[in-house]
Image: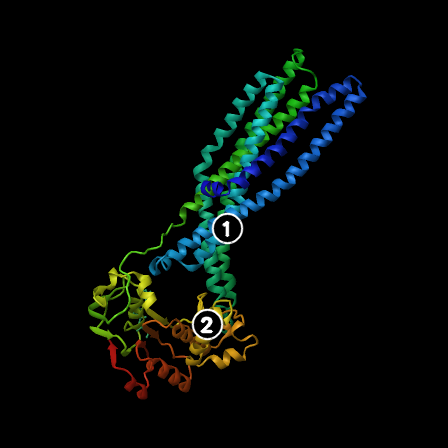
Amino acid sequence: MKKYFLKHKILNFILIILTTITVGAQTINSMLLIPLMQAMTDKNVNQFLRILLIFVVIFVVLVLANYFQTVVQTIVTQKQVNDIREDILTSVSNMNYEEFHSRKSSDYVSWITNDMSMVETEGFANFYNIITCIITVILTALALFKLNNTILIVAIVLGLLMTTAPRIFDDEMRRAVKNISQKNEKFTFISNNYLTGFDLLFHNERTKLLIEKIKISFTDLKQAKVKQSKVQASMIVVILLLNVIAQCSMLGLTGYYIIQGKLPIGAIMVSVNLSGVLFNTIQTMVGAYSRAKANGNILDKYPVVERDDLGISKDFDNIISSKNLTFKYNDKSTITYPSFTFSKGKKYALIGSSGSGKSTLFKLLIGDLRKYQGNLNFDNDSYSELNVSSLHNNISIVDQTSHIFSDTVRNNLTLGLEFTHQEIKEATDKAQITDYIESLENGYETILKDTSDLSGGQAQRLSLARALLFNRNIFLIDEGTSSLDKEIARKVEDTILKTKDKTVIMITHHLREESKKDFDEIIELS
Ligand SMILES: Nc1ncnc2c1ncn2[C@@H]1O[C@H](COP(=O)(O)OP(=O)(O)OP(=O)(O)O)[C@@H](O)[C@H]1O
């Protein structure tokens, strides 16, 4: 958290100044009670009105400072929370395929939503609460010092006792907060998983499963929150007890000095007021410190991932080849591949029964899976030594999942890169999707919601158009035309297979008899 606080040091400094003005105004008004009471005792109306006027002016300052303090605190908190979100997303965007998929994607959603609202309401809010408390304690202590030295010393001792005793709950609090974060992740995952399967449940008359499954995870979340609240409540009981003891001691001590004639009668009001403020503030501060600390630790769980630019970066010149290539998913049996060679500019069909390892080979070729055995070479370099970005820059892929972003058709095609309209249209022409796009209300600028806005075949043609637009040396296509009708599939495949200088590797279940002649080689996996 310190890093984010320092990044916005000017705004934070302004916030501290505004907090000091607010707290200072409150303390001065408390101190004004002594001359105010004295003026009343002396029946000095002019003096009374003068002090009352000062009281009102300071009160106006307090209200204004308080207003700006609230606004600045919101601005700086939002900036800091967004910085944390950006850092998390930077790490996520730097992850490789295996690292990203080692967690559920809903975990990432939970990090930047649930966790950030905890960091905002518990972490930063408590942190600023502590700053306000520290300023209050310092100014109140100064005021008490003005009243009487001994009273100040007693107040310091009691204050220290109040701040140290509740530390015994620190570890338990940290565990409770971590537990809430984990339960939040699980809740988001289960909700997402079952809600996205609504259609399946609906058509099987099983939508009740939504409640049954999701309820378990929000019941778990409730229990985690109750647990945290119990730890917090125990801590508050201890602090409250010490607070009562401290305020009674101050009352007794001030009363003793007044009886002794060492303090004026008005001092009792000031002492009660200031020690109330002091010890209540310490009570708030200790609770806030414990919660801020526990929430600050949430930040430790996010991995810091730097961009991996290691490995050889190159352009595809000649061949991809394999020898004795095998791959094993954790506890599954080993997938064994025949030796193969994909030469530049040639066209290959990869066929094989279900489960024979076609999609796994697709992931090996694009560099998603790195832990293979045997040889897999990109020209003369081993795949394991290659930089993944350079593979991405050489291979255009179309896989079985045609993800659609909630964005315009154009941005779904370009993924934010610059292409001329001519280039985009040529790609959509080749993928046989231009007519459909132009029939939409805003053509290429039409905003698609998600995959449900398109038919399976349309989504697939959009993916094909993107691959054609990106126009890399190799086309790697996994069942890329399976959702298209025969006529369109034939046209799209023809276009791809006729691109002379491109290497095409097409994984398919549906190799049509008449297409076989268009491939240089058909490789069968078993
Ligand atoms: N992520 C994974 N974790 C564990 N095992 C996996 C994973 N993905 C695939 N497998 C297993 O690896 C084997 C090959 O799967 P793969 O998806 O590569 O086959 P495929 O030939 O593409 O199948 P299909 O034609 O049905 O799509 C299968 O036994 C499958 O169960």
Ligand 1 located in image quadrant: bottom left
Residue 506 horizontal side relative to residue 92, left or right: left
Q: Residue at x 67, y 11 (%)?
A: 261
Position of residue 494 measured from the top left corner of the image (x, y, whole percent): 35, 84
Residue located 64% across and 37% down the image: 65
- Neighbours of disc 2 within 10 Å: few (<14), some (14-19), many (20+): few
Tell me the element at label 1.
Answer: helix
Residue 126 visible, this orientation: no
Q: Secondary structure at mark 2?
A: loop
Image height check: is 304 above or below 330? above
Residue type for callout 2: Thr
Tell me, yes or no, if residue 64 can be seen here. yes
Q: Which residue is mark 1?
A: 82
Tell me the residue at 47%/39% (across/down).
Answer: 293
Quadrant (top left/top right/bottom left/bottom right) for the C terminus: bottom left
Q: Nearer the viewer, residue 125 or 220?
A: 125
Q: Amino acid at mark 1?
A: Asn
Vertical side of 420 occupied by 42: above or below: above
Return the mark for residue 237: none
Residue behind mark 2:
420
Query: Of callouts 1 and 2, which one flags the residue occurring earlier in the amino acid sequence?
Result: 1
